[in-house]
Amino acid sequence: MITTLLVANRGEIACRIFRTCRELGISTVAVYSDADAGSLHVREADTAVRLPGAAPADTYLRGDLVVAAALAAGADAVHPGYGFLSENAGFARAVQDAGLVWVGPPVKAIELMASKTRAKELMAAADVPLLAPVDPGSATLADLPLLLKAAAGGGGRGMRIVRELAALPAELTAASAEAAGAFGDGEVFAEPYVERGRHVEVQIMADGQGTVWALGTRDCSLQRRHQKVIEEAPAPGLDDGLRRRLHDAAVAAAQAVGYRGAGTVEFLVSAGGRPYFLEMNTRLQVEHPVTEAVFGLDLVALQLRVAEGGPLPAAAPPAPAGHAVEARLYAEDPARDWQPQTGALLTLEVPAEPGVRLDTGYTGGDTVGVHYDPMLAKVIAHAPTRTEAVRLLARALERARIHGPVTNRELLVRSLRHPDFVAGRLDTGFYDRHLTALTAAGAPGEDAARRLAATAAALATAAGAAGGGAGPARLGAWRNLASRPQTRCYRAEPDGTEYEIAYRTGRDGTPAPGTGERVLAARPGAVTLETGGVTRHFTVTPHADRVHVDTTAGSYTFTALPRFTDPAERTEPGSLLAPMPGTVVRLAEGLVPGAAVEAGQPLIWLEAMKMEHRVLAPASGTLTALHAAPGLQVEVGALLAVVQDAPAEAPAHQEETTR
């Protein structure tokens, strides 16, 4: 009987395994690198052991240190999670040699399935078509395109598509280096790359008494950089004959190696519906929650039961029910080549709706570092039908509050609502074809929605400055008079679009926008606006110079642009800026665009604090733009006019005269 379990992993999978352990009354041990010292999986474990260093090769890939940690903490079993050492036969053997229970398949099964040649022989015996391996050293044009794959692991690491022979040597080197860094083994192999194929897999679970379950299919075709992004169970659009063939092949593979525990047999299904065996993953998969949802099982609990020598609960698995879809939420920018993002994760909240599950290794206040995979969480939705599950997941993501680094949340929502995905037209080239459209700005109504969100941000800030409506706002050294309009400027992230929001503060301290929206409520953290007869609610959360605005239809992040710093830093030479908040009282005679002006010539008079201030031409030239007019009330830094055709070496000057 297992009493104390060490999880040789980190992040969400460690937290997920700990959750089952708590339900079963098993004590937990975490291991952590220096970079993970404050991580959620460390906080959730009963005991934690440090692995000095930060790089995976120095920490989570050091099997000797992990085994020593288990012994030091008094653990009697080790669960490898996925990735890192989870498919390392040497590590599994070391765990058992130390007298610990290995929560995974037999060492021999890991070795056999790690051998791609042996694995393909097993699948050939099960009558599954194979992709014949290609020797990279003798590859010809006829072999292209090729797919390079890491021999020791998955998750997209060590994978490259090669379409030109000249690129093959460099891609081999890169794939090998990536595989070595991720799995401690740089071996890679090559096979034909099937265009527009589907990635379909079968979850298996086997005990030591000869029972093997085939727990349905999963489709994992939506991938970026060969890493899965959206997965679902069951795989849609497969006929019954193909499903049976996949199930039978997976069971035969498990039986051929005396498999025990959880594993996955992966296939590539061509556009014509022909399956090709890819590999067998001798571990738990990232996407296992969709299978758990459909079959009503806890796969980790079954892993622990089998590791203790117990049988599966029945000769056949339970009947599946409904459909489940999982989306991987990454800290990355899909529009910028999937660039990983780092920094403080200030808020991570997903609606706790029936049918929605969140697996994560983060909470608000944690930091997303540079050393590991940028996945923040997995969000899973389960419903009676595929249509309902997809809709539920898209809505949960849309309503989530995620403040901090840029994420792929918007891409996930758009992907789930894309006509091809909705119709089940899936293949691994989905993002190659659709990424540009899925990440494009300027969708119908998007600019208006962002401007309204920026308006809510401005009103919430104004309400806070006014003491929540207790009186007129005080901003810096300037008192905002109730009748005077104010402006706030925001830059939308990550695309940089700027919004200037004007509003007035009433004598009761309530701010009102200058664009006609009706303010139903305005507090520092929440604003309710009515526009076009439609009421919308906004939650506004400031963090330093960032403002996060969450609505039921989307979320927005803005950078509040400074109001009382030197605004000349953000303007073109020749711009005349308001040196302070005030009212334009008059213009120089004949001042119109196209007029010639002389350096030092008074052009605009502002009134502020019972004083008149003259704005002078910074240099001789032509007035190319005029934004000031008598009676206009302006904020500091407002653009009043532009003078060009001469160097603007000095900022606009001001002189003061008493009235």
Image (cartoon, rainbow, N blue to C red):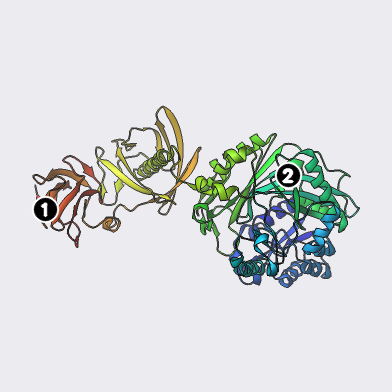
Q: Is residue 83 visible?
A: yes
Which residue is at the front of the view, 395 or 338?
338
Q: Nearer the viewer, mark 1 or mark 2?
A: 2
For residue 422, which quarter of the picture?
A: top right
Of residues 529 and 245, the one drawn nearer to the viewer in this rendering: 245
User: Where residue 653 sits: x, y (%)?
Assistant: 16, 57
Q: Which residue is mark 2?
A: 273
State whether residue 165 is above or below residue 436.
below
The residue carrying pointer 2 sits among few (fewer than 14), some (14 to 19) or many (20 or more) residues within 10 Å by Cα, namely some
* Label annotation for residue 97: none
Residue depicted at 81% across the width and 43% down the height: 244
- Where is residue 535 shown, x and y percent of the image? 44, 30
Is the Cβ of the residue at disc 1 closer than 8 Å to that at disc 2? Answer: no
Q: Quadrant of residue 165?
A: bottom right
Counting from the top left corner in percent of width and height, residue 182 is at 66, 66
Badge 1 density bin: few <14, some 14–19, many ≥20, Cα 10 Å: many
Q: Which residue is mark 1?
A: 597
Outermost residue to the top: 533
In this rendering, the answer to whether 594 lies above or below 46 is above
Quadrant into which the N terminus falls? bottom right
Q: Secondary structure at mark 2?
A: loop
Amino acid type of the residue tagged 1 in the rendering = Val
Q: Does residue 482 appear left or right of residue 61 in this picture?
A: left
